[in-house]
Image: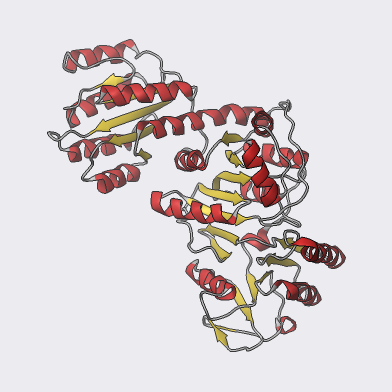
Amino acid sequence: MSPRDLSPFFAPRSIAVIGAGERATSSGGAIMQMLQRAAYGGRVVPVNPKGGTIFGYESVTAIGAIDPPVDLAVIVIRPDAILEAAAECAGRGIRNLLILPGGFAEAGPAGVARNEALLKLAAERGLTVAGPNCAGIVHLDPAWRFAATFLRDLPPGAAANGLAFISQSGALAEEFIDKANARGLPLTSVVSVGNAVHLGVEDYLAWLGARPEIGAALLYVESIEDHERFRTLAREVAAIKPVIALFGGSTVVGGLAAAAHTGAIANDDAAIDAFCTSCGIVRVESLRRLLIAAKAFGRFPQGLGKRALILSNSGGPGVICADRAALEGLEMGALPQPMADVLRQRLPPEASAANPIDLLADARDDRFGLAFEAAMTHAASAYDMVLMIHVVPFMVDAGPVIARLAELAGAARLPVMHSMMGTLPGKADWFATMERAGVPMFNDVEEMAEAAGLLARYPILRNSARSDTLPGGVFHDRKRRQL
Protein backbone atom coordinates (compact mmCIF):
# COMPACT_ATOMS: atom_id res chain seq x y z
CA MET A 1 0.00 0.00 0.00
CA SER A 2 1.50 3.32 -1.07
CA PRO A 3 1.65 5.87 1.75
CA ARG A 4 0.66 9.48 1.22
CA ASP A 5 3.50 11.86 0.39
CA LEU A 6 3.64 14.10 3.44
CA SER A 7 6.75 16.04 2.44
CA PRO A 8 4.83 19.35 2.41
CA PHE A 9 3.92 18.80 6.09
CA PHE A 10 7.35 17.76 7.33
CA ALA A 11 9.81 19.39 4.94
CA PRO A 12 8.08 22.28 3.16
CA ARG A 13 10.36 24.64 1.26
CA SER A 14 7.92 27.50 1.79
CA ILE A 15 5.14 28.18 4.29
CA ALA A 16 2.56 30.81 5.12
CA VAL A 17 1.49 31.41 8.72
CA ILE A 18 -2.10 32.63 8.59
CA GLY A 19 -2.69 34.50 11.82
CA ALA A 20 0.99 35.26 12.44
CA GLY A 21 1.80 37.80 15.15
CA GLU A 22 4.68 39.31 17.08
CA ARG A 23 3.40 38.30 20.52
CA ALA A 24 5.09 35.02 21.44
CA THR A 25 2.23 34.07 23.79
CA SER A 26 -0.28 34.11 20.93
CA SER A 27 -0.75 31.07 18.72
CA GLY A 28 0.52 32.89 15.65
CA GLY A 29 3.49 34.28 17.57
CA ALA A 30 4.34 30.85 19.00
CA ILE A 31 4.44 29.34 15.52
CA MET A 32 6.75 32.09 14.25
CA GLN A 33 9.00 31.71 17.28
CA MET A 34 9.29 27.93 16.89
CA LEU A 35 10.15 28.24 13.21
CA GLN A 36 13.09 30.40 14.18
CA ARG A 37 14.12 28.18 17.08
CA ALA A 38 14.12 25.20 14.74
CA ALA A 39 16.34 27.13 12.30
CA TYR A 40 13.87 26.56 9.49
CA GLY A 41 15.63 27.57 6.28
CA GLY A 42 12.72 27.95 3.87
CA ARG A 43 10.62 30.89 2.76
CA VAL A 44 8.22 32.20 5.42
CA VAL A 45 5.23 34.41 4.64
CA PRO A 46 3.38 35.75 7.70
CA VAL A 47 -0.23 36.73 6.99
CA ASN A 48 -1.71 39.44 9.19
CA PRO A 49 -4.27 42.15 8.27
CA LYS A 50 -2.04 44.78 9.92
CA GLY A 51 0.96 43.96 7.73
CA GLY A 52 4.47 44.97 8.76
CA THR A 53 7.45 42.91 9.81
CA ILE A 54 6.80 39.87 12.02
CA PHE A 55 9.75 38.08 13.62
CA GLY A 56 11.95 39.54 10.91
CA TYR A 57 9.77 38.42 8.00
CA GLU A 58 7.83 40.86 5.83
CA SER A 59 4.15 39.99 6.10
CA VAL A 60 1.26 40.25 3.67
CA THR A 61 -2.20 41.45 4.62
CA ALA A 62 -4.21 38.79 2.80
CA ILE A 63 -3.85 35.21 1.60
CA GLY A 64 -4.41 36.38 -1.98
CA ALA A 65 -1.19 38.39 -1.73
CA ILE A 66 1.01 35.34 -1.19
CA ASP A 67 3.13 35.24 -4.33
CA PRO A 68 4.15 32.67 -5.40
CA PRO A 69 2.02 30.06 -3.59
CA VAL A 70 3.62 28.18 -0.72
CA ASP A 71 3.96 24.45 -0.05
CA LEU A 72 2.10 24.63 3.26
CA ALA A 73 -0.29 27.01 4.98
CA VAL A 74 -0.30 26.90 8.79
CA ILE A 75 -3.63 28.27 10.02
CA VAL A 76 -3.93 29.70 13.54
CA ILE A 77 -6.97 31.99 13.43
CA ARG A 78 -10.33 31.76 15.19
CA PRO A 79 -12.44 28.73 14.15
CA ASP A 80 -15.27 30.68 12.52
CA ALA A 81 -12.82 32.23 10.05
CA ILE A 82 -11.00 29.04 9.08
CA LEU A 83 -13.32 27.87 6.30
CA GLU A 84 -13.00 31.18 4.50
CA ALA A 85 -9.21 31.06 4.89
CA ALA A 86 -9.11 27.50 3.53
CA ALA A 87 -11.14 28.55 0.50
CA GLU A 88 -8.77 31.47 -0.10
CA CYS A 89 -5.79 29.13 0.13
CA ALA A 90 -7.36 26.88 -2.49
CA GLY A 91 -7.97 29.88 -4.70
CA ARG A 92 -4.31 30.87 -4.38
CA GLY A 93 -3.12 27.38 -5.32
CA ILE A 94 -2.10 26.33 -1.81
CA ARG A 95 -3.16 22.70 -1.40
CA ASN A 96 -1.73 21.63 1.97
CA LEU A 97 -3.16 23.01 5.21
CA LEU A 98 -2.07 22.47 8.81
CA ILE A 99 -4.96 23.67 10.97
CA LEU A 100 -4.16 23.95 14.67
CA PRO A 101 -7.29 25.47 16.30
CA GLY A 102 -10.20 23.35 17.46
CA GLY A 103 -13.87 24.10 17.02
CA PHE A 104 -14.66 21.25 14.64
CA ALA A 105 -15.93 17.69 15.22
CA GLU A 106 -15.14 17.92 18.93
CA ALA A 107 -17.18 21.10 19.45
CA GLY A 108 -20.85 20.10 19.38
CA PRO A 109 -23.35 20.52 16.51
CA ALA A 110 -21.81 23.77 15.23
CA GLY A 111 -18.37 22.20 15.18
CA VAL A 112 -19.63 19.07 13.43
CA ALA A 113 -21.23 21.24 10.74
CA ARG A 114 -17.98 23.17 10.33
CA ASN A 115 -16.09 19.90 10.05
CA GLU A 116 -18.42 18.64 7.31
CA ALA A 117 -18.04 21.90 5.43
CA LEU A 118 -14.25 21.62 5.64
CA LEU A 119 -14.32 18.08 4.29
CA LYS A 120 -16.60 19.13 1.43
CA LEU A 121 -14.38 22.08 0.55
CA ALA A 122 -11.25 19.93 0.67
CA ALA A 123 -12.79 17.32 -1.62
CA GLU A 124 -13.96 19.92 -4.12
CA ARG A 125 -10.70 21.88 -4.20
CA GLY A 126 -8.16 19.08 -3.80
CA LEU A 127 -6.88 20.09 -0.37
CA THR A 128 -5.06 17.91 2.16
CA VAL A 129 -5.65 18.90 5.78
CA ALA A 130 -3.60 18.00 8.85
CA GLY A 131 -5.52 18.54 12.08
CA PRO A 132 -7.59 20.49 13.00
CA ASN A 133 -7.50 20.67 16.80
CA CYS A 134 -3.85 19.72 17.06
CA ALA A 135 -0.60 21.08 18.50
CA GLY A 136 1.36 20.91 15.23
CA ILE A 137 4.31 19.09 13.69
CA VAL A 138 8.04 19.05 14.46
CA HIS A 139 10.58 17.36 12.19
CA LEU A 140 14.21 18.10 12.99
CA ASP A 141 15.81 16.27 10.09
CA PRO A 142 19.43 17.51 10.12
CA ALA A 143 19.13 18.15 6.38
CA TRP A 144 15.97 20.29 6.69
CA ARG A 145 14.67 21.33 10.10
CA PHE A 146 11.03 22.34 10.50
CA ALA A 147 8.67 23.09 13.38
CA ALA A 148 5.13 24.44 13.12
CA THR A 149 3.81 24.02 16.64
CA PHE A 150 2.75 25.87 19.75
CA LEU A 151 4.20 23.19 22.01
CA ARG A 152 6.51 24.92 24.47
CA ASP A 153 9.81 23.32 23.50
CA LEU A 154 11.62 21.47 20.74
CA PRO A 155 13.02 17.95 21.16
CA PRO A 156 16.77 17.32 21.04
CA GLY A 157 16.84 15.89 17.52
CA ALA A 158 19.48 13.42 16.33
CA ALA A 159 22.10 13.16 13.61
CA ALA A 160 20.85 9.67 12.69
CA ASN A 161 18.42 6.98 13.91
CA GLY A 162 16.12 9.56 15.44
CA LEU A 163 12.87 8.74 17.17
CA ALA A 164 9.44 9.83 15.97
CA PHE A 165 6.53 10.28 18.38
CA ILE A 166 3.01 10.35 16.90
CA SER A 167 0.34 11.17 19.45
CA GLN A 168 -3.42 11.50 19.68
CA SER A 169 -2.81 13.70 22.71
CA GLY A 170 -1.14 17.07 22.50
CA ALA A 171 -0.43 16.97 26.22
CA LEU A 172 1.51 13.73 25.88
CA ALA A 173 3.46 15.24 22.98
CA GLU A 174 4.46 18.07 25.32
CA GLU A 175 5.44 15.58 28.02
CA PHE A 176 7.45 13.45 25.64
CA ILE A 177 9.47 16.44 24.46
CA ASP A 178 10.17 17.42 28.06
CA LYS A 179 11.36 13.93 28.99
CA ALA A 180 13.41 13.62 25.82
CA ASN A 181 15.31 16.78 26.72
CA ALA A 182 15.77 15.71 30.33
CA ARG A 183 16.96 12.20 29.44
CA GLY A 184 18.86 12.89 26.24
CA LEU A 185 16.54 10.82 24.03
CA PRO A 186 17.20 11.24 20.29
CA LEU A 187 13.69 12.52 19.55
CA THR A 188 13.59 14.02 16.06
CA SER A 189 9.91 14.18 15.07
CA VAL A 190 6.75 14.93 17.04
CA VAL A 191 3.25 14.86 15.55
CA SER A 192 0.06 15.94 17.27
CA VAL A 193 -2.61 14.19 15.21
CA GLY A 194 -5.69 16.12 16.33
CA ASN A 195 -9.04 15.39 14.70
CA ALA A 196 -7.31 13.89 11.65
CA VAL A 197 -9.89 14.79 9.03
CA HIS A 198 -7.46 13.48 6.41
CA LEU A 199 -4.22 12.33 8.06
CA GLY A 200 -4.41 9.68 10.77
CA VAL A 201 -1.77 8.01 12.89
CA GLU A 202 -1.13 5.44 10.16
CA ASP A 203 -0.45 8.12 7.52
CA TYR A 204 2.19 9.79 9.66
CA LEU A 205 3.62 6.41 10.64
CA ALA A 206 3.95 5.28 7.02
CA TRP A 207 5.72 8.48 5.92
CA LEU A 208 8.06 8.74 8.90
CA GLY A 209 8.71 5.01 8.83
CA ALA A 210 10.16 5.36 5.34
CA ARG A 211 12.48 8.21 6.31
CA PRO A 212 16.18 7.30 6.66
CA GLU A 213 16.66 9.79 9.51
CA ILE A 214 14.06 7.94 11.65
CA GLY A 215 15.20 4.76 13.41
CA ALA A 216 12.04 3.94 15.40
CA ALA A 217 8.47 5.19 15.75
CA LEU A 218 6.56 5.57 19.01
CA LEU A 219 2.79 6.00 19.13
CA TYR A 220 0.11 7.07 21.58
CA VAL A 221 -3.22 5.79 20.23
CA GLU A 222 -6.75 5.86 21.56
CA SER A 223 -8.74 5.11 18.42
CA ILE A 224 -8.30 4.02 14.82
CA GLU A 225 -10.58 4.72 11.89
CA ASP A 226 -9.65 1.86 9.53
CA HIS A 227 -7.92 -0.93 11.41
CA GLU A 228 -7.12 -2.96 8.29
CA ARG A 229 -5.35 -0.02 6.64
CA PHE A 230 -3.56 0.73 9.88
CA ARG A 231 -2.46 -2.89 10.15
CA THR A 232 -1.15 -2.99 6.59
CA LEU A 233 0.87 0.22 6.91
CA ALA A 234 2.14 -0.63 10.39
CA ARG A 235 3.39 -4.03 9.22
CA GLU A 236 5.23 -2.39 6.32
CA VAL A 237 7.05 -0.11 8.76
CA ALA A 238 7.62 -2.81 11.40
CA ALA A 239 9.30 -4.98 8.79
CA ILE A 240 12.18 -2.50 8.63
CA LYS A 241 12.18 -0.58 11.92
CA PRO A 242 10.52 -0.78 15.34
CA VAL A 243 7.04 0.56 16.04
CA ILE A 244 6.25 0.86 19.75
CA ALA A 245 2.77 1.84 20.89
CA LEU A 246 0.90 2.80 24.03
CA PHE A 247 -2.84 2.28 23.55
CA GLY A 248 -5.03 4.29 25.88
CA GLY A 249 -8.41 3.00 27.03
CA SER A 250 -7.59 -0.64 27.78
CA THR A 251 -9.54 -0.65 31.05
CA VAL A 252 -13.22 0.06 31.66
CA VAL A 253 -12.51 3.43 33.25
CA GLY A 254 -9.82 4.32 30.72
CA GLY A 255 -12.08 3.25 27.87
CA LEU A 256 -14.79 5.64 29.02
CA ALA A 257 -12.21 8.44 29.21
CA ALA A 258 -10.91 7.60 25.72
CA ALA A 259 -14.46 7.62 24.34
CA ALA A 260 -14.94 11.13 25.71
CA HIS A 261 -11.55 12.23 24.35
CA THR A 262 -11.33 10.71 20.87
CA GLY A 263 -14.61 8.86 20.40
CA ALA A 264 -12.89 5.48 20.79
CA ILE A 265 -15.01 2.37 21.10
CA ALA A 266 -13.99 0.36 24.17
CA ASN A 267 -11.54 -2.50 23.62
CA ASP A 268 -10.39 -4.96 26.22
CA ASP A 269 -6.74 -5.54 26.94
CA ALA A 270 -6.59 -8.87 25.11
CA ALA A 271 -8.03 -7.37 21.91
CA ILE A 272 -5.46 -4.56 21.94
CA ASP A 273 -2.68 -7.07 22.57
CA ALA A 274 -3.78 -9.26 19.66
CA PHE A 275 -4.10 -6.25 17.36
CA CYS A 276 -0.60 -5.01 18.20
CA THR A 277 0.84 -8.46 17.55
CA SER A 278 -0.92 -8.64 14.20
CA CYS A 279 0.58 -5.25 13.30
CA GLY A 280 4.13 -6.16 14.31
CA ILE A 281 3.95 -3.49 17.02
CA VAL A 282 5.82 -3.69 20.32
CA ARG A 283 3.11 -2.85 22.81
CA VAL A 284 3.79 -1.07 26.10
CA GLU A 285 1.25 -0.60 28.87
CA SER A 286 2.33 2.73 30.37
CA LEU A 287 3.94 6.05 29.51
CA ARG A 288 6.84 5.04 31.74
CA ARG A 289 7.52 1.99 29.58
CA LEU A 290 7.10 4.01 26.39
CA LEU A 291 9.88 6.28 27.61
CA ILE A 292 12.01 3.25 28.51
CA ALA A 293 11.43 1.96 24.98
CA ALA A 294 12.51 5.32 23.60
CA LYS A 295 15.76 5.03 25.54
CA ALA A 296 16.35 1.46 24.38
CA PHE A 297 15.44 1.77 20.71
CA GLY A 298 17.14 5.14 20.47
CA ARG A 299 20.43 3.26 20.98
CA PHE A 300 19.59 -0.15 19.45
CA PRO A 301 17.00 0.57 16.74
CA GLN A 302 17.00 -2.97 15.36
CA GLY A 303 16.41 -4.60 18.73
CA LEU A 304 18.48 -7.34 20.35
CA GLY A 305 18.27 -11.05 21.03
CA LYS A 306 16.99 -12.42 24.33
CA ARG A 307 20.14 -14.01 25.81
CA ALA A 308 21.41 -11.79 28.63
CA LEU A 309 24.52 -11.77 30.80
CA ILE A 310 24.20 -9.83 34.05
CA LEU A 311 27.46 -8.43 35.38
CA SER A 312 27.11 -6.87 38.84
CA ASN A 313 29.13 -5.89 41.87
CA SER A 314 26.22 -6.42 44.25
CA GLY A 315 24.14 -9.51 44.97
CA GLY A 316 20.75 -7.95 45.71
CA PRO A 317 20.51 -5.75 42.61
CA GLY A 318 21.73 -8.70 40.55
CA VAL A 319 18.90 -10.84 41.89
CA ILE A 320 16.29 -8.15 41.22
CA CYS A 321 17.63 -7.64 37.72
CA ALA A 322 17.50 -11.38 37.07
CA ASP A 323 13.90 -11.55 38.30
CA ARG A 324 12.79 -8.71 36.06
CA ALA A 325 14.76 -10.08 33.10
CA ALA A 326 13.04 -13.45 33.46
CA LEU A 327 9.62 -11.78 33.65
CA GLU A 328 10.50 -9.89 30.45
CA GLY A 329 11.21 -13.18 28.67
CA LEU A 330 15.00 -12.94 28.64
CA GLU A 331 17.21 -16.00 28.92
CA MET A 332 20.16 -16.05 31.32
CA GLY A 333 22.20 -19.06 30.35
CA ALA A 334 25.18 -20.33 32.31
CA LEU A 335 28.60 -18.81 31.70
CA PRO A 336 30.70 -20.50 29.02
CA GLN A 337 33.25 -22.70 30.78
CA PRO A 338 36.34 -20.74 29.61
CA MET A 339 34.87 -17.53 30.98
CA ALA A 340 33.89 -19.15 34.28
CA ASP A 341 37.41 -20.56 34.61
CA VAL A 342 39.03 -17.14 34.12
CA LEU A 343 36.76 -15.52 36.71
CA ARG A 344 37.25 -18.26 39.31
CA GLN A 345 41.01 -18.06 38.92
CA ARG A 346 41.27 -14.29 39.19
CA LEU A 347 38.36 -13.05 41.30
CA PRO A 348 38.23 -13.24 45.12
CA PRO A 349 36.85 -16.56 46.39
CA GLU A 350 33.72 -14.84 47.72
CA ALA A 351 32.80 -13.56 44.25
CA SER A 352 30.25 -15.42 42.13
CA ALA A 353 31.36 -16.71 38.74
CA ALA A 354 27.84 -17.42 37.56
CA ASN A 355 25.08 -15.53 35.74
CA PRO A 356 24.52 -13.02 37.38
CA ILE A 357 28.20 -12.39 38.04
CA ASP A 358 28.86 -10.81 41.44
CA LEU A 359 32.20 -8.97 41.59
CA LEU A 360 31.55 -7.91 45.24
CA ALA A 361 30.85 -4.39 46.46
CA ASP A 362 34.50 -3.33 46.70
CA ALA A 363 35.17 -4.10 43.01
CA ARG A 364 37.31 -1.47 41.31
CA ASP A 365 38.32 -0.94 37.72
CA ASP A 366 40.58 -4.04 37.68
CA ARG A 367 37.73 -6.45 38.53
CA PHE A 368 35.19 -4.73 36.29
CA GLY A 369 37.71 -4.65 33.46
CA LEU A 370 38.59 -8.32 33.93
CA ALA A 371 34.95 -9.43 33.83
CA PHE A 372 34.13 -7.19 30.88
CA GLU A 373 37.07 -8.43 28.82
CA ALA A 374 36.33 -12.04 29.73
CA ALA A 375 32.76 -11.61 28.50
CA MET A 376 33.90 -10.15 25.18
CA THR A 377 36.59 -12.80 24.72
CA HIS A 378 34.72 -15.93 25.79
CA ALA A 379 30.99 -15.15 25.69
CA ALA A 380 30.30 -13.00 22.62
CA SER A 381 28.59 -15.92 20.88
CA ALA A 382 26.74 -17.09 23.99
CA TYR A 383 24.83 -13.88 24.76
CA ASP A 384 23.08 -11.06 22.92
CA MET A 385 23.69 -8.35 25.52
CA VAL A 386 25.47 -7.50 28.75
CA LEU A 387 23.50 -5.83 31.54
CA MET A 388 25.97 -4.22 33.94
CA ILE A 389 25.15 -3.14 37.49
CA HIS A 390 27.40 -0.79 39.41
CA VAL A 391 26.80 0.03 43.07
CA VAL A 392 29.23 2.62 44.47
CA PRO A 393 30.12 2.09 48.16
CA PHE A 394 31.85 4.81 50.17
CA MET A 395 35.30 3.18 49.99
CA VAL A 396 35.44 2.99 46.17
CA ASP A 397 36.14 5.80 43.71
CA ALA A 398 33.77 5.16 40.79
CA GLY A 399 35.65 7.47 38.42
CA PRO A 400 38.34 4.96 37.37
CA VAL A 401 35.70 2.23 36.99
CA ILE A 402 33.64 4.40 34.66
CA ALA A 403 36.73 5.44 32.70
CA ARG A 404 37.77 1.82 32.20
CA LEU A 405 34.30 0.62 31.19
CA ALA A 406 33.83 3.51 28.78
CA GLU A 407 37.18 2.70 27.19
CA LEU A 408 36.31 -0.98 26.80
CA ALA A 409 32.77 -0.26 25.54
CA GLY A 410 34.12 1.38 22.40
CA ALA A 411 35.39 -1.99 21.12
CA ALA A 412 32.79 -4.23 22.77
CA ARG A 413 31.65 -7.25 20.78
CA LEU A 414 28.32 -7.32 22.59
CA PRO A 415 25.73 -4.57 23.15
CA VAL A 416 26.05 -3.17 26.66
CA MET A 417 23.64 -1.39 29.02
CA HIS A 418 24.59 -0.07 32.44
CA SER A 419 22.76 0.76 35.66
CA MET A 420 24.17 2.66 38.64
CA MET A 421 22.46 2.52 42.01
CA GLY A 422 22.82 4.20 45.38
CA THR A 423 24.18 7.62 46.29
CA LEU A 424 26.07 8.84 43.23
CA PRO A 425 27.92 12.13 43.82
CA GLY A 426 29.31 12.14 40.30
CA LYS A 427 26.20 10.80 38.60
CA ALA A 428 25.87 13.41 35.84
CA ASP A 429 29.50 13.07 34.75
CA TRP A 430 29.55 9.29 35.07
CA PHE A 431 26.35 8.89 33.07
CA ALA A 432 27.57 11.31 30.40
CA THR A 433 30.89 9.47 30.04
CA MET A 434 29.18 6.14 29.48
CA GLU A 435 26.54 7.58 27.16
CA ARG A 436 29.29 9.12 25.01
CA ALA A 437 30.77 5.65 24.76
CA GLY A 438 27.46 4.38 23.39
CA VAL A 439 26.20 2.72 26.58
CA PRO A 440 22.60 3.53 27.62
CA MET A 441 22.51 4.42 31.32
CA PHE A 442 19.70 3.62 33.75
CA ASN A 443 18.87 4.70 37.29
CA ASP A 444 17.81 1.25 38.41
CA VAL A 445 18.25 -2.34 37.34
CA GLU A 446 14.57 -3.02 36.72
CA GLU A 447 14.32 -0.28 34.11
CA MET A 448 17.42 -1.67 32.42
CA ALA A 449 15.93 -5.18 32.35
CA GLU A 450 12.64 -3.81 31.03
CA ALA A 451 14.52 -2.00 28.26
CA ALA A 452 16.30 -5.23 27.38
CA GLY A 453 13.02 -7.12 27.31
CA LEU A 454 11.41 -4.61 24.96
CA LEU A 455 14.42 -4.77 22.65
CA ALA A 456 14.17 -8.56 22.55
CA ARG A 457 10.53 -8.46 21.45
CA TYR A 458 11.12 -6.57 18.23
CA PRO A 459 13.14 -9.09 16.15
CA ILE A 460 10.34 -11.65 16.56
CA LEU A 461 7.68 -9.15 15.52
CA ARG A 462 9.86 -7.91 12.64
CA ASN A 463 10.13 -11.43 11.26
CA SER A 464 6.37 -11.80 11.55
CA ALA A 465 5.81 -8.50 9.72
CA ARG A 466 8.12 -9.65 6.92
CA SER A 467 6.26 -12.93 6.47
CA ASP A 468 3.16 -13.54 4.38
CA THR A 469 1.28 -14.91 7.38
CA LEU A 470 -0.83 -12.36 9.21
CA PRO A 471 -1.28 -13.14 12.91
CA GLY A 472 -4.84 -12.99 14.10
CA GLY A 473 -6.35 -10.12 16.02
CA VAL A 474 -9.51 -8.08 16.20
CA PHE A 475 -9.75 -4.39 16.94
CA HIS A 476 -12.91 -2.33 16.61
CA ASP A 477 -13.21 0.76 14.46
CA ARG A 478 -13.85 4.04 16.18
CA LYS A 479 -16.68 6.49 15.63
CA ARG A 480 -15.09 9.92 15.64
CA ARG A 481 -11.91 11.78 16.50
CA GLN A 482 -10.87 14.63 18.75
CA LEU A 483 -7.57 15.82 20.22
In front of the other: 93 or 410: 93
In the rendered image, residue 105, in percent from the top left (x then y), is placed at: 76, 59
In the rendered image, residue 414, in percent from the top left (x then y), is placed at: 39, 29
Up-down: is 340 above or below 427?
above
In the rendered image, residue 123, in percent from the top left (x then y), is placed at: 85, 62
In the rendered image, residue 315, in percent from the top left (x then y), is placed at: 27, 21
Direction left: furthest residue: 395
* Quarter of the figure with the C terminus: bottom right
Residue drawn at x 50%, y 22% as measured from the top left: 329
Residue drawn at x 63%, y 37% as measured from the top left: 238
Up-down: is 411 above or below 21?
above
In front of the other: 51 or 385: 51
* Quarter of the figure with the N terminus: top right
Q: Which colour scheme is used?
A: secondary structure
Residue drawn at x 14%, y 34% as measured from the top left: 396
**Image side of residue 326 versus residue 394, left or right:** right
Residue 210 seen in render: yes
Residue drawn at x 59%, y 75% as measured from the top left: 28
Q: Quadrant of residue 356?
A: top left
Count of picture labels: 0
Residue 439 seen in render: no
Q: Quadrant of residue 138?
A: bottom right
**Image side of residue 431 versus residue 400, left or right:** right
